Amino acid sequence: MQKENEKTLEPDVMRAMAEFLSGLWFEDDFRDQPEYLSEIFETILLTEMGDDLDLRIRMVSSIRTSKLLANALGSFTDKEINNACKKIMNA
């Protein structure tokens, strides 16, 4: 993570986000990630480890973040997202 108040150009940030999103296409479908995380975390919650409140908070946060990503991009095709990422990275 960069230090606060460093000079960062907005195109650099957008390019980094585009590279991140582009990298998602090499993984399983991101649209399924909230469900996968929920299954994993539900299993963990049944164990003694699941009693840790900090862990529970991080799990809920991870699911929420994953849902936000899936909701934000879910209506677009993989090709549309990939083309947008390429356009941003080449800008």
Image: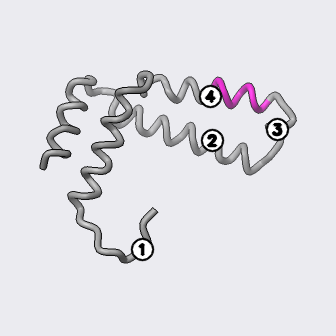
- Which mark is in front, 2 or 1? 1
Looking at marks 3 and 4 on the same chain, the residue that comes earlier in the sequence is marked by 4
7 on left or right of 53: left
Looking at marks 2 and 1 on the same chain, the residue that comes earlier in the sequence is marked by 1
**Range of magenta residues:** 38-45
Around disc 4, counting alpha carbons within 10 Å, would you say few (fewer than 14), some (14 to 19), or many (20 or more)?
some
Residue under the point 33% across and 33% down = 73
> Three-letter amino acid code at disc 2?
Val
Q: CA distance from mark 4 to mark 2?
A: 9 Å
Percent across and percent down for residue 14 are 26, 52
For disc 4, the marked residue is 38
Query: How many tags in the picture?
Result: 4
> What kind of element bears circle 4?
helix
Residue under the point 23% across and 66% down = 9
> Three-letter amino acid code at disc 4?
Ser
Q: CA distance from mark 3 to mark 4?
A: 16 Å
> What kind of element bears circle 2?
helix
Which mark is on residue 4?
1
Residue under the point 37% across and 77% down = 5
Percent across and percent down for residue 22 are 30, 35
Looking at marks 3 and 2 on the same chain, the residue that comes earlier in the sequence is marked by 3
For disc 3, the marked residue is 49
> Three-letter amino acid code at disc 1?
Glu
Towards the viewer: 71 or 11: 11
